[in-house]
Amino acid sequence: MATSSCFNQVKVVAMSTVLAPYLMPDGFGRPPLAALLREGSVVTEAGRLAVHRTGARQARRKTPYAARSAVRAAEPVLLVPGFLAGDWTLTQMAAGLRARGFRTYRSTIHANVGCTLNAAALVESRLERIAERRGTRVQIVGHSLGGMIARGIAVRRPDLVSGIVTMGSPMLAPGAHHRLLTGGVTVLNRLSQIGIPGVMSADCVSGPCAEISFNEVREPLPAGVAMTNVYSRRDGIVDWKACIDPLGVAVEMRASHIGLAVDPRVIKVVGEALLRQSSTGVATLSIAGTA
């Protein structure tokens, strides 16, 4: 009996992840294996961030104290990390936005490896608390899967969300990602199959959970909710074409998928998008050296 049980467990672990066909609509595809090499440019992007931060510090020291602070933007901003990532991956994005006057909040996601619907519920709960505390709707910045989560919540809760900015989020084809990423999903599915709690199950990529998430992301945005889609043709992780929602404002950047979260040029664009989308129309002034 024990032998049979062990055999069945091994058989389950040997199963491979099967993405639901609708997650890869016609016209989209997986980045080729060699595309992953483009992600190496994150080293350059991180270096660009270091240089930028040094210049900003020097400019700040030369700026009179009374003129250092940026005008506070009225709407708070919640940042949501991508698949396999946590809030720490958006630390530099948060710092850059705060320097531009935005009040930023973490999603409290330590590792985005669980059920997408559960992650969305967590983010929605976080939004409710922020909106109640600040007395205003919130804008969301989401990287990769985080942008897809933001898109779904914006559809359900326009009372909480005034705008979203996605970065490298394949909303039109969630399955259009590198096979290496699929491997990560497979590992999580197998861990779920043997009873490990809190990780993404097969239902999240081929069952009702996946279908609910996918359909929600494709629904029209409610009136009064703005959207900007930041994407890069150099993205080595997802098909860049899947990141452009026809209902949003598309902004092309030259960066790796990972670099979209740290490149100072992208941070500037995200800040500009948030300001443009602000329902209050309150201008935000950048301190010297951060523009």
Image (cartoon, grey):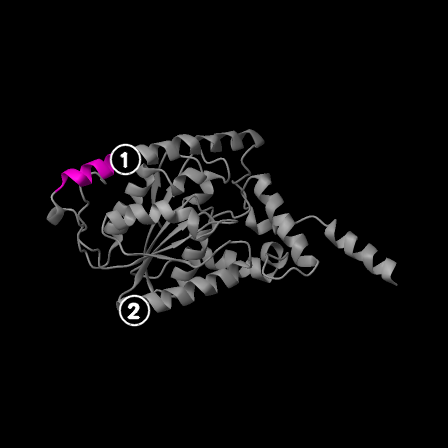
Residue nearer the viewer, 23 or 272? 272
Q: Specify which label sits upstream in the sequence, 1 or 2.
A: 1
In the rendered structure, find residue 54 and report the number of the disc placed on it. Answer: 1
Inspect this view and state whether residue 50 appears.
yes
Assess disc 1: are there few (<14), some (14-19) or many (≥20) residues with their C-alpha within 10 Å of its C-alpha.
Answer: few
Residues marked 1 and 2 touching at CB (< 8 Å): no
Could you tell whether 35 is left or right of 286 in the image? right
Query: Which quarter of the image is occupied by the N terminus?
Result: bottom right
Region in magenta: 54-63
- Seen at 39% across and 65% down, the residue is 126
Query: Which quarter of the image is occupied by the C terminus?
Result: top left
- Seen at 24% across and 34% down, the residue is 55
Q: Amino acid at mark 2?
A: Arg
Q: Main secondary structure of the magenta part?
A: helix
Inspect this view and state whether residue 245 appears.
no
Residue nearer the viewer, 239 or 61? 61
Residue nearer the viewer, 8 or 31? 8
Q: CA distance from mark 1 to mark 2?
A: 34 Å
Residue 160: % across, % down: 34, 65
Q: Is residue 92 above or below residue 121?
A: above
In the rendered structure, find residue 272 and report the number of the disc placed on it. Answer: none
Q: Is residue 196 above or below residue 47?
A: below
